[in-house]
Each structure stands twice: as C-alpha cells, then as structure tokens.
Image (spheres, rainbow, N blue to C red):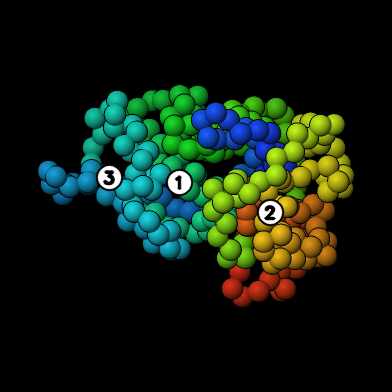
Amino acid sequence: MIMFPNAKLNLGLRVISKRSDGYHDIESVFVPTPWYDALELNENTKFKQGENPCNLTISGLNVGGDAAQNLVVKAYKLLSKTHSLPPVNVHLLKSIPIGAGLGGGSADGAFMLKLLNMFCNLEYSESELEVYAAQLGSDCSFFIRNKPAMVSGRGDRLGWPEIKLQQLSVLMVYPGIHLPTIEAYSNLNIDNHSGSKSLLEIIHSPIEDWKENFQNDFEEYAFAKYQEIKLLKETIYQQGALYASMTGSGSAVFGLFDMEPNISWIPENYYWKLGNL
C-alpha cells in the first residue's frame, strides 16, 4: 500500500506568544502543495522476535538522524500502544527537503497514521486521526484532511472556513539552507500584531493586496542571517509573482503566479518544484 505525503506552505505566519509548555501559539493559513514524498507499507512476513516491528528504510534525500526518531516510526509506535499492529516494512522515498519549512516530516508522520488506519482496518475517523497526529507534532494534524485550513495554537488547532484560492501556479524554491526550527524560534522577535487584519480577512482580499498584509514573522531573522533567502524572495517577485513569502520557519520561498513562471534563473544547486494550487 502506498501514499504520497505532500508539502504545505504558509500564507502568513504570526507567532503570537510563547506557551508555558515551551511551544509557541501561532496563526497561519496552511495550504497543501504538489511536492511529494512516497511512503510504502507492507506486512513484514519475515519478522523475527526481537527485531523492530516497524522496519523503516529511506532513499532519496538524506534525512540523517536515527530512524527510530523518524515520525513514521513514531506514528507506528503511537498506534501500537492501543492496537496489536502487525510487523511492517516501510519505505520512505524522500523528495521534500528537510529544514525547509515545507512540513515534509510532519506529512510523513500523518500519512503513516492514515496508511495504518487503512492497512489494519482501524476505522478511525479523520477527527480521531487528528487527535493522534497532534501527539506526533505541531503541524501533523493538518495533513489528515489535507486541505486549506486556518491554523492556531501550536499548529494543532484547525479551522475549515471556505477558502477559495483562484487557479494559481506555485513555484517553491529551497536554497539548500537548513534553518532548524529551534534556532528560528529562539531568535524570534515576537510582535503583538496589534491592529493587524485577521488572516481570514486577508485571504479573502485580492491577491494583489497580500504583499502588504500577510507577513511571516520568521523572515526578519532568516533574512538577516542569510542574504540568499532575502534575495530569493526579491527575485521571485521580479519574475512576476503576485505574492511571495518564505514558508514556515524557512528557508524555502514560494511565489504565486497567474501564469507559468520562468524557472531558468534558478541556481543548479537549489531544489525547486513547480505546480498548481
């Protein structure tokens, strides 16, 4: 059984305050995008006692770290606390860059929950899976329904107002700069956003107005430390984007276009993806 976890982008990202549990309260609009990993799951019929019941192999982009800490494995362990799951072989083909603000790791964990729900006939509803996903990570719950959402709390409180995005081309470019989320948050200058328009009001305004109203609070630090990211956003606007922004805590930058954009300017050492919202 196979699924294709996708990246997300942020239309605006406000960090409201630091919480007592160490997380931060945020406000954002999450939108799924056509940049995919591949996640394949099969029963491990050759499993031997003492082996890891969730055998994960990874190809494609290097994710580093201990496989046991991957959210795919954590999703299996989470469900195995309340269910007798069969031993499985899982292969992750990694295409979404890590440390880019695209949510690829969160998507992998959430899609593993959805895979196990189908594979093991657990019959969980989307709402029930969202509860499990919130235990995996702040952004994981979004990927269960995987449609445009108003996001608040630490990223786990989701609202589903009618968000109609016109048919737009989206160009996502990752300059290969790994900007750790912890570093981004620790250098954040939190603004109280007094007088700011609501994100819902902005999202329903003409896209030509988004440049002046949407903001990503992580850009200030990211642009000051890495001029390449600031230049990337400026270049995307020069190429005719109606709106451009860094996504998440960085360092990927996206642009929304009402035509297919030119991609010849993108440096060879950058990762990029072009698609439609």
Q: From the viewer's side, name the closer residue of 264 and 225.
A: 225
Quadrant housing residue 179: bottom right
**In the rendered structure, which disc, 3 or 2, sits on the residue that comes first in sequence?**
3
- Label 1, on which residue? 108
Tag 1: Cα neighbours inside 10 Å, few (<14), some, or many (≥20)? many
- Position of 20 compared to 277: left or right? left
Q: Could you give the CA–CA distance between mark 3 and mark 2, rounded to whole angstroms?
A: 39 Å
Looking at the picture, does residue 217 appear above or below residue 273? above
Q: Secondary structure at mark 2?
A: helix
Q: Position of residue 9 (x, y in %)?
A: 64, 47
Q: Secondary structure at mark 3?
A: strand
Q: Which mark's residue is nearer the viewer, 3 or 2?
A: 2
Drawn side of residue 80 relative to residue 27, left or right:
left
In the depicted structure, whether residue 118 falls above or below residue 261: above
Q: Residue 128, image x and y in percent?
A: 45, 24
Residue that carries the numbered disc 3 in the rendered image: 54
Quadrant, the N terminus:
top left
Quarter of the image holding residue 121?
Answer: top left
Residue 127's spot in the image, x, y percent? 50, 24
Tell me: residue 175, above or below residue 129.
Answer: below
Label 1: state its secondary structure. helix
At horizontal 38% and vertical 48% (from top left) the residue drawn is 70
Are dots 3 and 2 in contact, CB under 8 Å? no
Q: Amino acid at mark 2?
A: Tyr
Query: Mark 3 is on which residue type?
Result: Cys
Q: Residue at x 62, y 54 (%)?
A: 250
Is residue 194 among the parts visible in the rendering? yes
Question: Looking at the image, which residue is at 78% across and 66% down?
Answer: 235
Q: Earlier in the sequence, mark 1 or mark 2?
A: 1
